[in-house]
Amino acid sequence: KKRTFSGVQPTGNIHLGNYLGAIRNWVVGQAQYENIFCIVDLHAITLPIDARELHENTRKLAALYLAVGLDLEHCKLFVQSHVQEHAELTWILNCFTPMGWLNRMTQFKTKAADDLDSVSNGLYSYPVLMASDILLYHAHYVPVGDDQRQHVELTRDIAQRFNSLYKQPVFTLPQAQIRDVAARIMSLSEPTKKMSKSDPDPQSRINLLDDPKVIKKKIGRAQTDSERLVKFDPQRPGITSLLSIYQAITGKEQAVIEAEFEGKGYGDFKAALTEQLVATLEPIQKRYYEYINDMAELENILKQGADAVRPIAQETVCNVKTVVGLG
Ligand code: ATP
Ligand code: MG
């Protein structure tokens, strides 16, 4: 079986973008692959985060991974900082990554917002840590949202550069797995920006743990436009993003959806979308609370996951060190 690796940062509330763009696809493909899914807490400290919050978010995210249907028979689930090789390989790869390549990363530009005196070197090096995550396990596929496409490309470039420098296939070149539908869910309040955990505006996203009332309110307020036409249209990112959420959760074709709402307004569409969202999220939430209320079991699952993947990571780092002349 080919190997899949992916992760989410425990930086806040997991939202529909994370679910539809990434995590749900992990669940759908899990039986076909050998899967390693990580809670990337080392990435989470690239921007300021409260210690207690980080610790709690890490456990909550683990419970959500299980609640959405990741099956321990097919998947290893673990916390990035529990396997020290992630940090070790990152340092080595930092020394093989040209700054010019990192300067082109758009996520850094967005997150740093030109405030270079307060932003950390860790945020700049974020893509190298991500490359290490993927390359440590020789992953073939990296199922992510569209915003991570550039980072997976960079990972390939780093791997290729290293392999050709030492004239041996030390690293496997990974491929991003990005679906056509819902690969980039937009903010509900500013539909030209992607939905993000770190957006300070809580109205901008639907969290997987939002209750029906909150979902109804947020969808009700979600920005659309004055045209009142329920159609997919790149010129109208608000309604198009809501439609793509509807498309992703119902599995219907675009034309079928447009026909369904022909002659109807945004109110009807938003009511239907809310109903579908509530029906999708309710069972996930129910399972989430079961997992989060058994913390000992959750910790045990994470420990077993780290123990299972660590030998793979150790072997890669050992090999890399030998090739480079370290150790
Ligand atoms: P942050 O704002 O802290 O970066 P985030 O919402 O971008 O949080 P990440 O943990 O960085 O979430 O990303 C986890 C996964 O979710 C990645 O695969 C990413 O591509 C995907 N993802 C994030 N936002 C979206 C979105 N709006 N639409 C689709 N996929 C998304
Ligand atoms: Mg992100």
Image (tube, helix red, strand yellow):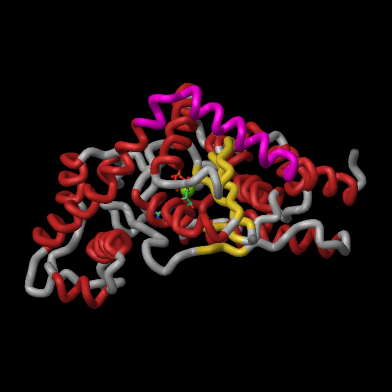
Report the residue at 47% width, 46% height from top. Answer: 70
Q: In the rendered image, which quarter contains the C terminus?
A: top right
Whether residue 79 is in magenta: the answer is: no
Q: Is residue 245 left or right of residue 49?
A: left
Report the residue at 34% width, 50% height from top. Answer: 16
- In the image, the segment drawn in magenta is 290-313
Comparing 34 with 138, the one in front is: 34
Regarding residue 246, the answer to whether it shows in the image is: yes
Residue 2 % position (x, y)? 64, 61
Regarding residue 118, the answer to whether it shows in the image is: no
Q: In the rendered image, which quarter contains the N terminus?
A: bottom right
Vertical comparison of 175 with 231: above or below = above
Principal SS element in the magenta part? helix
Residue 271 % position (x, y)? 13, 55
Residue most extreme to the front: 73
Comparing 181 with 93, the one in front is: 181
Report the residue at 54% width, 61% height from top. Answer: 149
Q: Is residue 98 left or right of residue 180?
A: right
Whether residue 295 is in magenta: the answer is: yes
Vertical comparison of 126 with 144: above or below = above
Q: Quadrant of residue 226?
A: bottom left
Report the residue at 32% width, 62% height from top. Answer: 248
Task: Give the tally of numbered discs.
Answer: 0
Q: Is residue 39 left or right of residue 309?
A: left
Residue 168 % position (x, y)? 86, 62
Residue 39 % position (x, y)? 54, 39
